[in-house]
Amino acid sequence: MKLCKDGAKTEQRRWIQKDCIYYFGGKSTLGFLPSWERNILPLPPSDMRGLLPPFLGADAATHARSPYPSTMSELASGLGTTPHREALLKNLITYRQMLATEGYTTGIQFVDGSFVENVEINASRPPSDIDVFSILSVPPKYLAAPPTWASTGLPFWQSEIAGPTAQVKNKLRFSLDTYAVLFEEMGPGDLIQNTIYWYSLFSHQKSTQAWKGFVALQLDPVADQAALSLLGSP
């Protein structure tokens, strides 16, 4: 397995298919994450439709809009309102703990689906699952030893995180509908295209196509442990 250097051609960046890790200056990082904490606001209440509003206030051009940067504790306080919802959040935390154990500790997750809606009122049922789209950064251990990606990193990615096998498995064991991409795998165009697609998909209710809001979470194992205490877990 080769390690692509700075300035690698676009076709070399797709390292899952090309057996190549692309990296910037020897590091793999999502550079926009340090400002995350400055943007966190309390989750807005559901609007009259039982949906998170797509933006806050009367100005449709405001920057205070979905996806709403949040924390797991904020999500637990705002949306963990029933034992069933609490169980789904614990499953989400377990999924995030699994990512952290493998070394995925930097990334963003879009959280959506009926879980972020007042589906108990709108459809007279509990949320069946949580939809999760993750933009993940390659674990440092694979940047330090690129050959291990093919032997252990890629099989884990395919069986536990992304792809048909992982999706079926995560639906059964976690009640999560999971999708994921690797930051380092994509050039700027691919990253923009993926982000636009998932924003567009998650910002519209599937049954009505109504414009709505959703939540964004940074990976944070320490904060996840704090959230477990709010959910009644030791």
Image (tube, grey):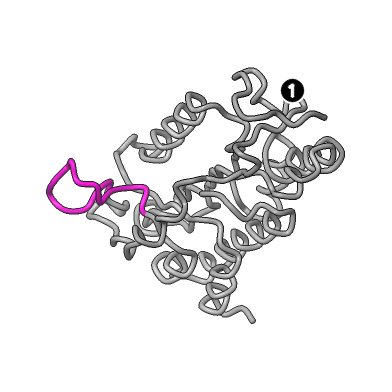
Q: At numbered mark 1, what does the secondary structure look like: helix, strand or loop? A: helix
Residue in view at x 35 percent, y 61 percent: 38
Q: In this view, does 142 lie to the left or right of 205?
A: right
Horizontal side of 109 relative to 210 (left or right) equals: right
Name above or below for residue 70 compared with residue 226: above
* Front residue (pair 7, 188): 7
Q: Mark 1 points at which residue?
A: 18
Q: In which quarter of the image is the N terminus?
A: top right
Q: In this view, does 168 lie above or below 186?
A: below
* Residue depicted at 41% across the width and 52% down the height: 215
Residue placed at 17% from the left, 42% from the top?
60
What percent of the width, then of the height, locates residue 223? 54, 69
Indicate yes or no whether the magenta region holds residue 21.
no
Q: Is residue 56 magenta?
A: yes
Give the class, few, some or many, for how many residues have Cα within 10 Å of label 1's Cα (few <14, many ≥20). Answer: few
Which image quadrant: the C terminus?
bottom right
Identify the residue at the far left of this view. Answer: 58
Q: Which amino acid does label 1 sit on?
A: Lys
* Residue in the foreground of this view, choosing between 170 and 60: 60
Residue 111 position within the rendered picture, expressed as x and y whole percent measured from the top left: 48, 50
Check the image and name the residue furthest to the right: 151
The region drawn magenta spans 54-68
Q: Position of residue 202 (x, y in %)?
A: 42, 40
